[in-house]
Image (cartoon, grey):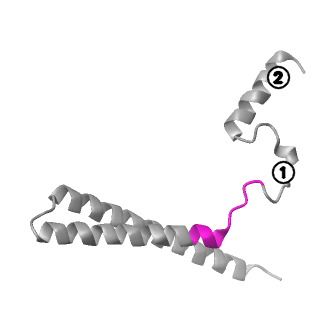
Amino acid sequence: MNSQALAAAKAYAALTGNGGSAAAKPAEAVGKTDFAAMLKGALGSAETSGTTLDQSIAAQAAGKGDIVDVVTAVAEAELTVQTIVSVRDRVISSYQEIMRMPI
């Protein structure tokens, strides 16, 4: 292997973060994520966003909060809800596509 190819391989390994040991890991373990854990984390994030929104609204109503915090919390909660709805729609669409497949 020439020096340019070796440098390119090292750069690629550094970018992928596996140190060039992709062959050392089983194919199933590379990039494998637990869907249930990912979904649980997303819903936890939505719950946290809602709690932050509630706290900032209560603080504003009590005269102790800043309106900028309320607006930011509302925008964050709205984005979280839109993301969850988008994922839900995609899951339903995928399920329907699978059900249309011939056996």
The local crowd at label 2, few if under 14, some if 14 to 19, many if 20 or more residues have their Cα within 10 Å, is: few
Q: Residue 25 bears which disc, if any?
A: 1
Residue extent of the magenta highlight: 30-39
Q: Is residue 9 left or right of residue 65?
A: right
**The image quarter in which residue 8 lies:** top right
| Residue 93 x, y percent position in the rendering | 60, 75
* Residue located beneath label 2 in the image: 5
Residue extending furthest top? 3
In the rendered view of the protein, which quadrant contains the N terminus?
A: top right
Q: How many badges with numbers are in the image?
A: 2
Q: Nearer the viewer, residue 8 or 50?
A: 50
Report the side of 67 relative to 95 (left or right). left
Alpha-carbon span between mark 1 and mark 2: 23 Å
The one of 84 and 56 positioned closer to us in this rendering? 56
Q: In terms of secondary structure, where does tag 2 sit?
A: helix
Q: Is residue 7 visible?
A: yes
| Above or below 10: residue 28 | below
Residue at 75% from the left image edge and 35% from the top image edge? 13
Type of amino acid under label 2: Ala
